[in-house]
Image (cartoon, rainbow, N blue to C red):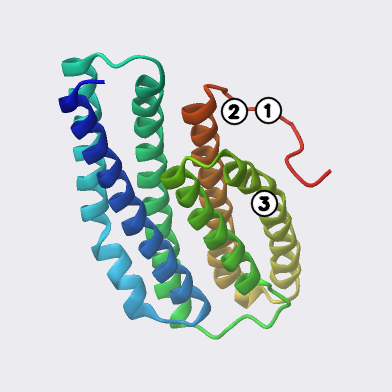
């Protein structure tokens, strides 16, 4: 590997980690805004989205520049391909954090729905997946990446339970339908963030091992 390529790859990795930190902060603030009814945090997420978008565009440009100038092969090429996909996944996470923040602003002005909703545990599970997927990326840790894949089923189950509980609320309390729909949307956005975390984990496996595991139905849980 040439010295220039090595320097460009190191810079790209730092930029990707910077974007990951920005997105993690946005997800954290958006979820706190929902659970603790903190509209001021939601506003910060919404206002910060342009910075995430700008960073995503910049990283994509860096990737294309490296491909054009250095024509990397093997592991370096896999890293660039994975970086392009992870970059896109992180930007989409940022968009979902904004969507959650917008719902948090609305819900903060309304009375809480009295139902057995396990939002705090779902939120913690999603945040754990985001952190772990980025840690796997930073450390190129395929074991941790596969652990992220195994976490996704639990988030799917939380989302299903949320749907059932809120469906019951809407049947029994028509006046709460709009609030319930906002909560359903929040749950769905959290599930999508978890799905994008699994995408990042899959890219880590591809980057390190050269193995594509997208669209597999393999059980990644404990044997």
Q: Are marks 2 and 3 in contact (CB under 8 Å)?
A: no
Q: Which residue is mark 3?
A: 151
Considering the numbered disc 2 on the image, is that residue within a helix, a strand or a loop? loop
Q: Where residue 184 appears, x then y in whole percent?
A: 60, 61
- Left of 149 or right of it: where is 110? left
Which residue lies at the image location 52% right of the left edge and 38% below the top edge? 199
**Which quarter shows the C terminus?**
top right
Q: Earlier in the sequence, mark 2 or mark 3?
A: 3
> Which mark identifies residue 216?
1
Distance, label 1 to label 2, CA atoms, is 6 Å
Considering the numbered disc 3 on the image, is that residue within a helix, a strand or a loop? helix
Viewer-side residue, 4 vs 180: 4
Considering the numbered disc 1 on the image, is that residue within a helix, a strand or a loop? loop
Residue that lies at the very extreme toward the bottom in this rendered image: 111
Residue 29 placement: quadrant: bottom left
Distance, label 2 to label 3, CA atoms, is 16 Å
> Which mark identifies residue 214?
2
Distance, label 1 to label 3, CA atoms, is 15 Å
**Which quarter shows the N terminus?**
top left
Q: Residues within 10 Å of mark 2 (few under 14, many from 20)?
A: few
């Amino acid at each position: 590997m040439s010295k220039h390529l090595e320097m460009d790859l190191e810079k790209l990795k730092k930029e990707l980690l910077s974007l990951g930190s920005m997105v993690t902060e946005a997800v954290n603030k958006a979820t706190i805004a929902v659970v603790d009814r903190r509209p001021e945090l939601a506003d910060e997420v919404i206002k910060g989205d342009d910075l995430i978008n700008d960073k995503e565009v910049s990283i994509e440009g860096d990737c294309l520049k490296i491909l054009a100038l250095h024509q990397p092969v093997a592991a370096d090429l896999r890293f660039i391909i994975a970086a392009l996909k992870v970059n896109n996944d992180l930007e989409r996470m940022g968009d979902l954090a904004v969507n959650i923040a917008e719902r948090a602003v609305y819900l903060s002005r309304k009375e809480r729905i009295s139902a057995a909703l396990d939002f705090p545990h779902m939120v913690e599970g999603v945040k754990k997946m985001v952190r772990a997927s980025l840690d796997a990326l930073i450390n190129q840790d395929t074991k941790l990446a596969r652990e992220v894949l195994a976490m996704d089923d639990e988030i799917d189950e939380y989302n299903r339970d949320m749907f059932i509980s809120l469906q019951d609320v809407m049947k029994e309390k028509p006046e709460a339908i709009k609030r319930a729909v906002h909560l359903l949307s929040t749950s769905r956005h959290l599930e999508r963030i978890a799905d994008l975390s699994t995408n990042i984990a899959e890219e880590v496996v591809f980057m390190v091992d050269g193995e594509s595991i997208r669209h597999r139905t393999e059980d990644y849980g404990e044997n």
